[in-house]
Image (cartoon, rainbow, N blue to C red):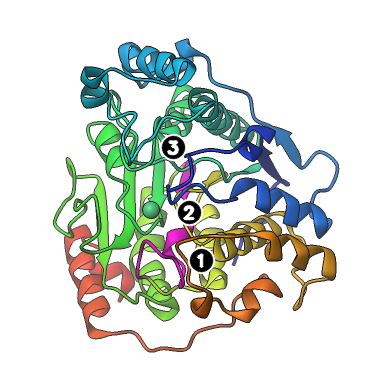
Amino acid sequence: MTRKRHPAVFVGHEIYRQAAYGTLHPLAIPRVEAVVDLCTALGWFRPGEYRVSPRATEAELARFHDPAYVAALRDASHSGCVEREVRERHGIGTMENPLFPGVFERAATSVGGSIRAAGLAMEGRIAFHPAGGTHHGRPDRASGFCYFNDPAFALLALLDAGLERVVYIDLDAHHGDAVQDAFAADPRVHTISIHEAGRWPHTGAADDTGEGRALNLPVPRGFHDAELVLLMDDVVLPLGRRLRPEAVVLTCGGDALAGDPLAAMALSNAALWDAIERAAALAPAAVVLGGGGYNPWTLTRYWSGLWARLAGHAIPATLPENARAILARLACDLVDEEDMKPEWLTTVADAPDAAPVRPAVRKLRDEALARTGLSGVAA
Ligand SMILES: [Zn+2]
């Protein structure tokens, strides 16, 4: 059962409409702006539900990031070039983390949005910030398309507000490595990550418990709906309840969906919405962030429908013409035309998937139960 909670709030900014990441990068696709457009077309913003993200100041950024790195990204962003030494030290101006006009402002806005989302969550709102979820950003360097680490700032804002038990749950296809590492030594934070095994950054093995408060569930390729339900029902939610969190922060990258070009998981958006709603209901305060996601159709449908579910808007079975036009305008070099599914252009919710749970996922569940001492609880 989803607990009754205060109204949801969407944190966004027009800066995400600006061209970013150049032309050849997987993130050079419409993402947050397409979500805002689709939600607007469907009438999914009531008055007061959309909030404009502030931009984090350099002083705020220095709460987690090395000031030398913050200054280097600012200078490189504004000049458009970077010295080799700076590129090597801070990982910026590379194929992975390219420089583009406005990169500093964009990244600082995603941090400001996550800090604001945490504040709104503390007011009892469920705060959705799809531009957040840059879970690979390191204190002194960019990593995995992430310049800063906005989830870390959401967690810090909750801790600064006096919370002593916060749970971070990462449902992106990639391990939430930099968030786990950032809080590994902090007894107030537990991290849980479900991610595809064998993917970059090649961390987050099942036996990686950080300093004892991290749970990693590396899942096989083709991870699908019934398997997510199993891990949520038997491991993630029981552990979450045992921890009695005062707040949860969720990273909800869309690369865990079927059809993503950079991962091989096979979840439906509806299964993820259910999992997120149930995880968010673990605590009286919840921050829901975005993350990866490189198929603009599946991503836009996922995050738009997630907002509808969080805010209590009805999702139509088929989309009206004005909404279809938004999905029809999207484009992506990484998705072949023959792989396009017709329903990506006409619906928001994926059809349910009925594949049975595979033995490898049951084994992962059993090992996690043993590791967390939950066996008795789930039985
Ligand atoms: Zn990812």
Q: Is residue 84 visible?
A: yes
- The residue located at (62%, 73%) in the rendering is 344
Query: Which residue lies most toward the left here?
Result: 207
User: At which x and y percent is residue 60?
Assistant: 47, 16
Query: Dot 2: few (<14), some (14–19), or many (≥20) neighbours within 10 Å?
Result: many
- Vertically, is 310 above or below 147? below
User: At which x and y percent is residue 134?
Assistant: 42, 40
Front residue of 322 and 265: 322
User: At which x and y percent is residue 157?
Assistant: 48, 26
Q: State which tag comes first along the sequence, 3 or 1.
A: 3
> Label 1 is placed on what type of residue?
Leu
User: At which x and y percent is residue 197?
Assistant: 23, 64
Query: Dot 1: few (<14), some (14–19), or many (≥20) neighbours within 10 Å?
Result: many
Magenta residue span: 246-264
- The residue located at (41%, 57%) in the rendering is 171
User: Of the numbered discs in the image, which one, if any, rests on residue 25?
Assistant: none
Front residue of 107 and 162: 107
User: Of the numbered discs in the image, which one, if any, rests on residue 252?
Assistant: 2
Residue at the spot of label 1:
272
- Location of residue 346 (image quadrant): bottom right
Mark 3 CB lies closer than 8 A to ligand 1: no
- The residue located at (55%, 69%) in the rendering is 269
Residue at the spot of label 3:
151
Mark 1 CB lies closer than 8 A to ligand 1: no
Tell me whether circle 1 and circle 2 mark residues in contact (CB < 8 Å): yes
**Is 257 included in the stretch rendered in magenta?**
yes
Tell me whether circle 3 and circle 1 mark residues in contact (CB < 8 Å): no
